[in-house]
Amino acid sequence: MSDGEVLLEVEELITAFDTDRGLIRAVDRVGFTVKRGRTLGIVGESGCGKSVTAMSIIRLLPQPAGRILQGRVMFKGRDLTKIPAKELRKVRGGEIGVIFQEPMTALNPVHRIGRQLSECFLLHKKMSRKEAWEASVEMLRLVRIPSPEMRMGDYPHQLSGGMRQRVVIAMALACRPDLVIADEPTTALDVTVQAQILDLMGRLREELGMALILITHDLGVIAENCDDVVVMYAGRVVEKAPVKELFARPLHAYTRGLLASIPRMDSAPKSVLPTIPGMVAGMADFVPGCRFCQRMERRGPTLRERPDFIEASPGHWVEACPICYAGKEENP
């Protein structure tokens, strides 16, 4: 498969959870593609369905409550929603790596780093224990952890937050996967370490020729590190485009609201940052129609019928709510 060829295609994905209030959709007909060698950013506030979408791709939803109701996840010609669990376990870690948000929950606190990292090679590469150990040391060296041989004997709590995140990255990249899903990989880190981790991930993406899905709240991270971007709101994709196009010409009111809330160098000192009024509704309270109109407490037909998802210009798609689309209202 050559660079630029579609590696992952998500089509009409619907994911729901069984709750006391019935079956509630957390992801509602989401679709996007990821090409080899490119980084797709998924951005939106907490509760918009970003992480559930990522976990749906590799079927790591909480059980028994979470389930995929509809849609396809085509990865290298296979629908991951349909393949047997045994085959899917080979895909996870082997062909798709995952970098979780909080390394202390991704790493087992009672096992040493060397044992946890070696397990990736033992499971997916059928190496001997000695070969797996040597490969693990090399992975720690690749992610720029000093004295990797010594760190192999450490427990997670003995490492700093940045080093733990590098270990998680090493585990995700151990088998040279074609796709890596990074779920807010820098949220718990300070700004300097964030920059180092993002630079490391970008460098490894280029060296290994993999694709990357980067989930984040930070539009600055999207602007600097992504080729394409998907904006999610209330379980749906409201806009998707190449990153330069989206920043130059945002078409949905929610996207414009997010961009307006970014601090600017030319803003007056101590001026109040613009914010989007209200908050994301609970999943059980989502309306069938435009959910951003719901947040803005509007009334009328836009709440009852879901807007069409249209291609406004080549490669630039937007949910065409009559009120929220194409600058028909002022920025929130």
Image: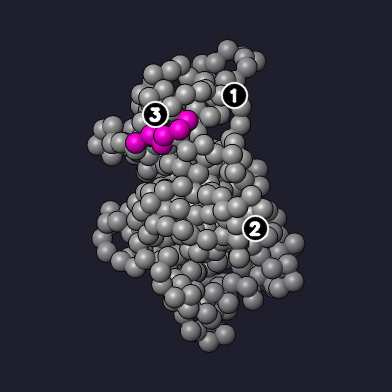
- Res 183 visible: no
Main SS class of the magenta portion in the image: loop
- Does 261 sit left or right of 249 as displayed? right
Sequence-wise, the earlier of marks 1 and 3 is 1
Disc 2 secondary structure class: helix
Residue 305 placement (x, y as % from top left): 41, 34
Q: Which residues are magenta?
A: 303-308
Depth check, front residue: 7 or 109: 7
Provide the residue designation for mark 1. 277
Disc 3 secondary structure class: loop
**Going by the picture, which residue comes out furthest to the top?**
268
- Res 48 visible: yes
Q: Residue at x 37, y 39 (%)?
A: 240
Verify whether residue 28 appears in magenta. no
Rendered view: 267 above or below 286? above
Q: Amino acid at mark 2?
A: Pro
Q: Amino acid at mark 1?
A: Pro
Provide the residue designation for mark 2. 103
Sequence-wise, the earlier of marks 1 and 2 is 2
Quadrant hosting residue 114: bottom right
Q: Which mark is residue 201?
A: none
- Does 81 sit left or right of 136 as displayed? left
Rendered view: 128 above or below 321? below
Classify 10 Å Cα crowding around label 1: few (below 14), some (14-19), many (20 and above). few
* Number of the front mark, 1 or 2: 1
Q: Are marks 3 and 2 in contact (CB under 8 Å)?
A: no
